[in-house]
Image (cartoon, rainbow, N blue to C red):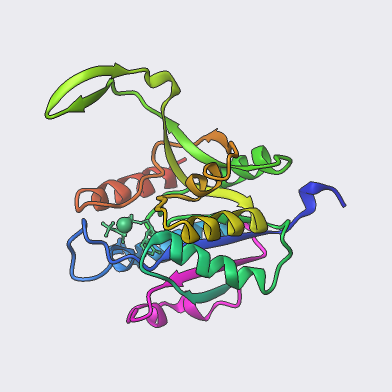
């Protein structure tokens, strides 16, 4: 068996409270058309048919998960997330470690990114499948970037080197778990999986993704996601 035959697991952190969204419930449970954001996201992952299983990390006091029909799917497992995103991801990795080998792949994907396409999933998989480190979907920056201090511009940043990190982020189970445990033990904070791997001195691969793979963060992002989903239906 070659490297390409290693199994791939999907891990969806969905234990956030959505503070910036300021809605009456966590944003992953807001409706986007007929279904919740989280259902859209899980449908995209299930539809790609490349995963051996999908693990969703929800918060301890989550009162919504059980009402989703997907919560009863045999392909989807629930774990309890933690207070930071990295804690939720580590909880999911610990679960996967109980059923998978260290060298199997994990793709971590935000619950709040429902517009991910099957094409982007496959491109990430094919780009990273033979990589020693792993990699992430990312977007080049088009705006001119300024570094500032006290409200004034200090200099213009060279944007040709700057990318916006998206998800999924794909790493081998053992490598990512070790990296996140090291981060936790050092009391450091990372905002994505690549950040933890970088702190190990490794250099994850950048794979250009689609710009409509947005993270629903603020109220205005919800109609934007609805628009992108509609547009994708016509592709
Ligand atoms: N997440 C998680 N566990 C946490 C925090 C976040 O699983 N303790 C998840 C969120 O549910 C989301 C993803 O990580 O799917 C990206 O995080 P973010 O967009 O920051 O979501 P929230 O933390 O919920 O939003 P906010 O930061 O505005 O409170
Ligand atoms: Mg957050």
Q: In the rendered view, tell whether residue 121 sits above or below residue 98.
A: above
Query: Quarter-wise, where is residue 69 in the image?
Result: bottom left
**Residue drawn at x 27%, y 46% as measured from the top left:** 224
In the rendered image, the vertical position of residue 234 relative to residue 11, given as above or below: above
Where in the figure is residue 208, as x and y percent of width and height? 51, 33
User: Regarding ligand 2, which quadrant of the image does it lie in?
Assistant: bottom left
Q: Is residue 222 left or right of residue 98?
A: left
| Magenta stretch encompasses residue 88 | no
User: Residue, x 50% and y 50% (percent of image)?
Assistant: 193
| Residue 231, horizontal then vertical, whole percent | 37, 43
Q: Number of numbered discs present?
A: 0
Q: Is residue 17 visible?
A: yes
What is the quadrant of residue 59 in the picture?
A: bottom left
- Position of residue 80 relative to residue 42, above or below, is below
Q: Position of residue 151 (x, y in %)?
A: 12, 28
Q: Which residue shows up at 57% across the image and 54% down it?
A: 179
Q: Looking at the image, which is closer to me, 145 or 196?
A: 196
Q: What segment is highlighted magenta in the picture?
A: 49-75
| Residue name at image x 54 percent, y 61 percent | 181
Residue at far right of view? 1
Q: Is residue 33 left or right of residue 104?
A: left
Q: Residue furthest front?
A: 186
Compared with residue 128, is residue 43 higher up or lower down, i.e. above or below?
below
Of 88 and 48, which appears nearest the observer?
88
In front of the other: 30 or 155: 155
């Amino acid at each position: 068996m070659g490297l390409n035959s290693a199994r791939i697991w999907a891990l969806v952190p969905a234990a956030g409270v959505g503070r910036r969204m300021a809605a009456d419930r966590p944003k992953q449970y807001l409706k986007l058309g007929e279904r919740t954001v989280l259902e859209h996201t899980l449908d995209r992952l299930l539809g790609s048919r490349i995963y051996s299983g999908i693990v969703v990390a929800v918060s301890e006091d989550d009162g919504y998960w059980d009402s989703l029909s997907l919560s009863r799917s045999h392909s989807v497992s629930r774990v309890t997330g933690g207070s930071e995103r990295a804690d939720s991801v580590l909880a999911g990795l610990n679960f996967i470690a109980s059923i998978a080998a260290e060298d199997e792949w994990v793709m971590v994907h935000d619950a709040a990114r429902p517009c991910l396409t099957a094409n982007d999933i496959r491109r990430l998989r094919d780009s990273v499948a033979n990589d020693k480190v792993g990699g992430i979907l990312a977007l080049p920056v088009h705006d001119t970037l300024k570094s500032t201090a006290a409200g004034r511009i200090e200099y213009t940043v060279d944007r040709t080197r700057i990318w916006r990190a998206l998800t999924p982020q794909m790493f081998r189970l053992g490598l990512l778990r070790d990296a996140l445990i090291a981060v936790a033990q050092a009391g450091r904070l990372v905002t994505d999986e690549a950040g933890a791997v970088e702190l190990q001195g490794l250099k994850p691969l950048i794979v250009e993704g689609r710009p409509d793979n947005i993270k629903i963060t603020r109220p205005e992002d919800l109609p934007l996601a609805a628009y992108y989903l509609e547009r994708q239906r016509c592709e």
